Amino acid sequence: MSVVRPLNLNEKTDGYRGIWYCIRQPHGGAKFKYSGGLGTYPAKHQEFAVYSPEANKTFFCFGGAAKDNQIHLLHMVSYYDHETGMVPKPTVLLDKHTSDAHDSPTISIDQQGFIWIFSPSHGRLRSSYIHRSVEPWSIDKFRVVYPHYKDDGRRRFVDNFSYAQIFNTAPGNFAFFFTRYGEGSARTSLYMTSKDGVTWSRRQRLATIERGHYQVAGVSSTKIATMMNYHPDETGLNGRTNLYYIESTDNGESWQAADGTPVKVPLLSSQNPALVKDYESQQRLVFLKDLVLDENDQPVLLYLTSNHPSHGPDGDPRTWTLAQFDDGQWQFSEITTSDHNYDMGSIDIRSTPWKLIAPTDPGPYPGFAGGDMVMWESDDRGATWRRVKSLTAGHGGNHTYCRLVSNAHPDFYALWADGDPTKISSSNLYFCNAQGDLFQLPAKMDSDFMQPEKIDVLAE
């Protein structure tokens, strides 16, 4: 790991600036595999925003950028005050001395109102960190937490984790899904739990099939759950395929498939009881987007399938797909198509109609990650979908990585960023309300509090 120590800042900055980030194409074709304003990246990070009814504020974090360097990552934390309709100057919490947006933070609020920030790492080159606010419902100052667990009687620190997904569950426990990199960048899916954020359970391996996995998790009041794809030995990361799902009703003491079949973890073989659909046999890739549990605690999985790991027409059709466990079996439906594997959206099924917000329009830079955000709705529980409106048409660059707010208030419903995916650029932060009205967070603030600007976009 790097010996460079992170700089804990706890200072205010004068506006909302998102990180610009890219992964270059390893060989041939396009310059970038994906790129742009990725302040709410990646899909395997959760959560970016949480509404607190006690404070009547939506607290959120994002991968910010330094004033003079659009690719220098800073961890930023802020809130939207639903009483005043204003936002403060964001708090710059942490500088990890990196430009890697995989290190962007995630947020959680505990039962006492303390705000927790989890700062992951991309692999094992850098350490990972956890911070807690000094005061409940406050972003003014954070302190480093030193999390640990017992393993064979030895005290071990939780100082390296990737793809952090942290949830504060109804019983008051933290449910923590994450990834650990091994030899050759193999990715193991893991789970831990804690009552206080300091003392954690022993790391539990969930899956370690061939070259590993990505996972996207979700929770309800009575269940924790995760979906995964896997990376075959022959094709590795670029061959991510298949769809798996496991859940637990006892906080990870035991795991089962959606139909109740017991599942032994870690998963070790590509053919196992957790397999939802065999996309490998169809030579289709699987890009995970969102997992939610319905009013009956049944899973709804959102993902995109593709023919090719790189962007361009070879990947078409890139299909937004819904897998739902209903009446004892998995049901599959298609929503729409996209022009890039890394288009990312979020789904809300808390009421009818169901909603999806995702960059399903190409936007000003077709063929690159993101595009124009579009709101889709379904009146029949995901069987069919209708396009409602474009949220961003004619404004900004390619909009990317829409993240639904946890326990969302209708006035601050989803959060994302934009940017120019063809070159390093500035990146603005946006949110929308439940009706799809667009607001831009202030990029430059001359006062301690400002109202976000309502943006008028081109009509459909």
Image (tube, rainbow, N blue to C red):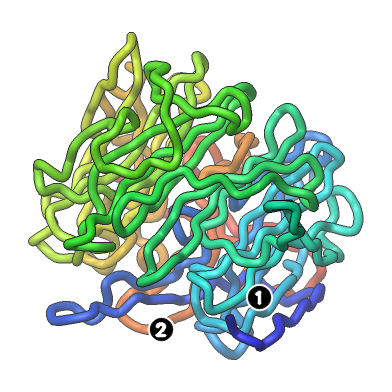
Q: Nearer the viewer, residue 416 or 169?
A: 169
Residue at 19% across / 66% down in the picture? Answer: 310
Quadrant where the C terminus lies? top left
Instruction: Say what secondary structure mark 2 lies in.
Output: loop
Question: Which residue does the numbered mark 1 point to in the structure image?
Answer: 444
Quarter assignment of residue 228? top left
Q: CA distance from mark 1 to mark 2?
A: 19 Å
Q: Nearer the viewer, residue 125 or 304?
A: 125
Residue at 71% across / 58% down in the picture? Answer: 117
Label 1: how many residues lie within 10 Å, few (<14), some (14-19) or many (20+)?
few
Q: Amino acid at mark 1?
A: Lys
Residue 28 lies, with reference to residue 48, above or below; the image says below
Residue 430 lies, with reference to residue 374, above or below; the image says below
Q: Is residue 70 left or right of residue 147?
A: left
Quarter assignment of residue 132? bottom right
Question: Which residue does the numbered mark 2 point to in the structure image?
Answer: 424
How far across and how far down the image is residue 263, in percent? 41, 28
How far across and how far down the image is residue 125, in percent? 53, 79
**Mark closest to the chain's N terminus, 1 or 2:** 2
Instruction: Say what secondary structure mark 1 lies in.
Output: loop
